[in-house]
Image: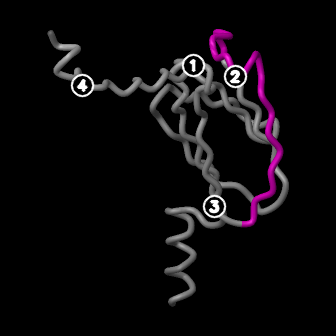
Amino acid sequence: MKCLFWLACCALVGCGPALTVRHDDFTSRLARLQLDGGKVRELAYGDNLTLRVDPGVHELQVTDPNGNSRWLGPTKIWQFFVDGDVAMTLEPPESAMPLPASPVKPLTPEQGK
């Protein structure tokens, strides 16, 4: 009976490792993801997607359909090994990040005159 309950839970929730991708690259509003040559999924900026994967080697292809992402270029491909849950974040390139504000020094009494 416990085994049947466990199998039912696995069917509803899913078993095995998961790949979670979060899209935080503000230079690209949309990313197209394709895992191991399978179904193409679209991921909007600020969203995340979780896919169940089998343990082993996988290939994730990420494409910016508008060609706007400076770090992706037209397509970026990652190969990775999964033996547990994996999370990755699509981030903007450092060149697109705003520069930190320079510290402001208070005026001395002589400069304030």
Mark 2 in CB contact with mark 1 (< 8 angstroms)? yes
**Does the segment drawn in magenta span residue 53?**
no
Q: Secondary structure at mark 3?
A: loop
Which sits earlier in the primary sequence, circle 1 or circle 4? Answer: 1
Q: 62 and 95: which one is in front?
A: 95
Which sits earlier in the primary sequence, circle 1 or circle 3? Answer: 3
Q: Which residues are magenta?
A: 65-83
Q: Which mark is residue 85?
A: 3
- Cα–Cα gap, marks 2 and 3: 25 Å
Which sits earlier in the primary sequence, circle 4 or circle 3? Answer: 3
Q: Is residue 48 left or right of residue 57?
A: left
Q: Is residue 16 left or right of residue 113?
A: right
Which sits earlier in the primary sequence, circle 4 or circle 2? Answer: 2
Q: Is residue 55 left or right of residue 111?
A: right
Mark 4 in CB contact with mark 2 (< 8 angstroms)? no
Q: Give the amino acid at mark 1.
A: Ala
Q: Where is residue 34 shown, x and y percent of the image?
A: 73, 34
Q: Say how many tags the image has.
A: 4
> Is 59 above or below relative to 98?
below
Q: Where is residue 24 shown, x and y percent of the image?
A: 51, 32
Among all residues in the image, which is located at the extreme bottom?
1
Scheme by which the image is coloured = one colour
Reading the image, the residue beneath label 2 is 71
> Is 14 above or below relative to 1?
above
Reading the image, the residue beneath label 4 is 106
